[in-house]
Amino acid sequence: LEVFFIGLLGVSLASTICMWIVDCATTGYINMSISEREKFDSDRRRAEEAERRRRLTSYTLMRPRTTTSLRNRYLSRVGAGLPSHLGHGALVTKSLKNH
């Protein structure tokens, strides 16, 4: 029974050392003081808010399709060969037909 508890103490010591090493290798959040954590959290929240704002304002409108691209896409879907003057000829593949 004593050996079991000594083994548990060894496992807990090893896991504590592993957590400390991982924390030091990443952000160091566990070893920060309260004021450092609050500053770190506020900076992180500010960065996330800026990223969210940037994502919301940087949308791009979809370009409307031209009549030619719609026609060519329809012909490809139904399996008809595109006219040779468009440079594609009968280049419709099986993978395009199945979509």
Image (cartoon, rainbow, N blue to C red):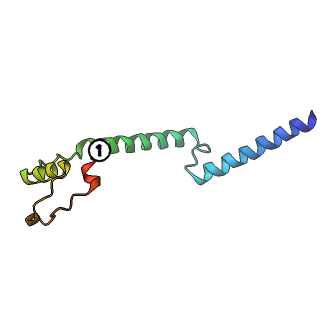
Q: Is residue 49 left or right of residue 59?
A: right
Which residue in the protein does label 1 denote?
55
Residue 19 location in percent, x, y? 67, 46
Residue 45 location in percent, x, y? 41, 40
Which residue type does callout 1 highlight?
Answer: Arg
Question: Label 1: few (<14), some or many (≥20) within 10 Å?
Answer: few
**20 and 1: which one is in front?**
1
Give me the residue at 16% from left, 64% from top: 88
Give me the residue at 17% from left, 62% from top: 90
Looking at the figure, which quarter contains the N terminus? top right
Give me the residue at 57% from left, 44% from top: 29
Query: How many numbered markers are drawn?
Result: 1
**86 and 30: which one is in front?**
86
Residue 83 location in percent, x, y? 10, 61
Q: Is residue 41 left or right of residue 20?
A: left
Q: Residue furthest right?
A: 2
